[in-house]
Amino acid sequence: MRKTIYFLIIQTFIVSVAKSQTPTWSDQIASIFYANCISCHNTGGIGPFSLVEYSNAKMLATSISSSVATRRMPPWPANTSKNRFSHEKVLSTTEIAAIKKWAENDAPSGDLSKAPTPPTTFNGNSIQNPDLDLKMEKYLVSTTSDEYRCFIIQPNLFTDKFIKSIEIVPGNRKIVHHALVFQDTNQKLLQLDAADPKPGYSAFGGTGSITSKLMGLYVPGQDPYTFPNGFGSKFDKNAFIILQIHYPPGVNQEYDSTGIKIIFNTDPNTREVAIAPGLNHDNKSLVNGPLYIPPNEEKTFYNTFNVPLKLTILTIAPHMHLIGESIKAEAIENKDTTVLIDIPKWQFHWQMSYTYKKPFIAARNTKLAGTAHYNNTSANPYNPNNPPLAVSLGEGTNDEMFQIYFWYTTYRFGDENLVFDSTKPKNVLSQHTMNKPLNVVLFPNPNSSRLVQIHNEGQSIKELQIINARGELVEAEFNASKSAFDVSNLPSGIYGVILKSHDGKSSFEKLILQ
């Protein structure tokens, strides 16, 4: 009897110690989510549900654990074994282990009265108290094909200024595919705007002016861009802003009023930074063009650019479309090769700019070299055409592009000693130690037909759940091998789809219904 009592006491002690060591929402998990997740996963954000509230996070704990264990979330397509960048959206191995243990133990709350206070700057407009806060005229979008439209905004600035931070805030996240922001003083653009009876004017492939200067961009997942200290983009006096917005096909009677927020740099010694696609698909840069991928083929393209004078490169941003699979940029000086960016698995819906922790110094005559691989076969789940069709260079979503943008300035002595982010890089899981995920793609996505196909690699789907932007379960199916599902009963919006396989793997996918 004494042995039995002793054994029970020991077991109780072990269980209590294990519970005490389990991370809780209040003491650890909320802080991880607030620092890494809620810039997207908030009410009104681009994420399909909010992770600000404990109740939502608890309900989705298993899927969240799976997503972070496979490094699908937070989205950070750049290869961390090749480069480390400023303010990376990655979780450390310790953070991932904490989330996993929390989920496995039924996502305990801890003492909610001691939980950290959620940030107040996550509501889709990360720049607070901007010097300029402007919006384009409200525009009603209804299109069956790719629509590129330019909207002019008058900031009425009468002196030159330097931009410290810039953010493009989509007025309707469901339909703004991407946006570029330019500045120009060319009155011709005002005439184009006046000649079009609708707000703005149609402009497929540029603004219509060769003097327009790129100031910034928006793609889903892109944070506001803040220049490193001492640097900025020059905003010319009397210039107006041109927002070029891409609306994808299948938008029916949806309003948009995209805006722009800017903070100016007050330092009179600010160094001017330019933005340009140094590596691109034009005849001067593309080595083995034209950019054309026949149906049922894979092709790799290369582009180059010789740096004409010594430059200091701050930031890099690659760009491709749907059948792109990987993209990389290197700098070759003499016999030395430096990887500038490597995205081994291209994600069209997660394009972003990457600022180096220290600037890259490109000597005069350094060769910049880009490599992009395209897969125009039915094995590519993102292929917009079934069966595959020929794809060539173009601005449309179903066309292709090959561009790598650089934020750069002329070199100054000592630039190699600058540090843009002094924080120690997180210890992250390598590709070789990641758990193999349930590899699922939903298509078409965005979806207007309401019939969603599931592409997965040999793993049958046992369970499917759909949640709305408030984290509420709106549909569920169990014990059914799925290859497609009908969502005709759901209104337009952003949803989360949780899929689980028979062997216990799970996947979380964002679905946009138009």
Image: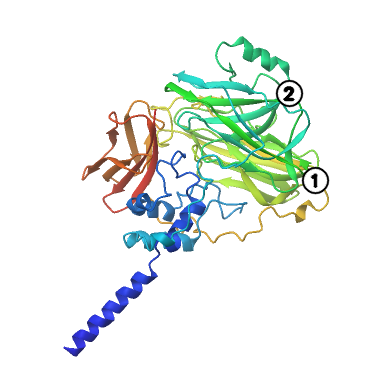
Q: Which residue is mark 1?
A: 411
The answer to whether residue 498 is visible is: yes
- The type of residue carrying mark 1 is Tyr
Q: Residues within 10 Å of mark 2 (few under 14, many from 20)?
A: few
Q: Name which residue lies at 66% across and 55% down.
A: 421
Quadrant into which the N terminus falls: bottom left
Q: Residues within 10 Å of mark 1 (few under 14, many from 20)?
A: some
- The type of residue carrying mark 2 is Thr
Q: Which mark is residue 42?
A: none
Q: Position of residue 205 (x, y in %)?
A: 60, 22
Viewer-proximal residue among 42 and 315: 42
Q: Name which residue lies at 72% across and 16% down.
A: 187
Question: Could you say whether the residue bearing mark 2 is in a helix, strand or loop?
Answer: loop
Viewer-proximal residue among 92 and 233: 233
Q: Which residue is mark 2?
A: 211
Question: Could you say whether the residue bearing mark 1 is in a helix, strand or loop?
Answer: loop
Q: Which numbered mark, 2 or 1, is in the foreground of this view?
A: 2
* In this rendering, position of residue 361 left or right of residue 354: right
Please say if 471 is above or below 152. below
Question: Which residue sits furthest bottom?
Answer: 2
- Distance from disc 2 to disc 1, alpha carbons, whole Å, reads 24 Å
* In this rendering, position of residue 420 left or right of residue 454: right
* In this rendering, position of residue 19 left or right of residue 88: left
Q: Position of residue 93 (x, y in %)?
A: 48, 61
Quadrant into which the C terminus falls: top left
Sequence-first disc among 2 and 1: 2
Q: Which of the 4 image quadrants contains residue 142?
A: top left
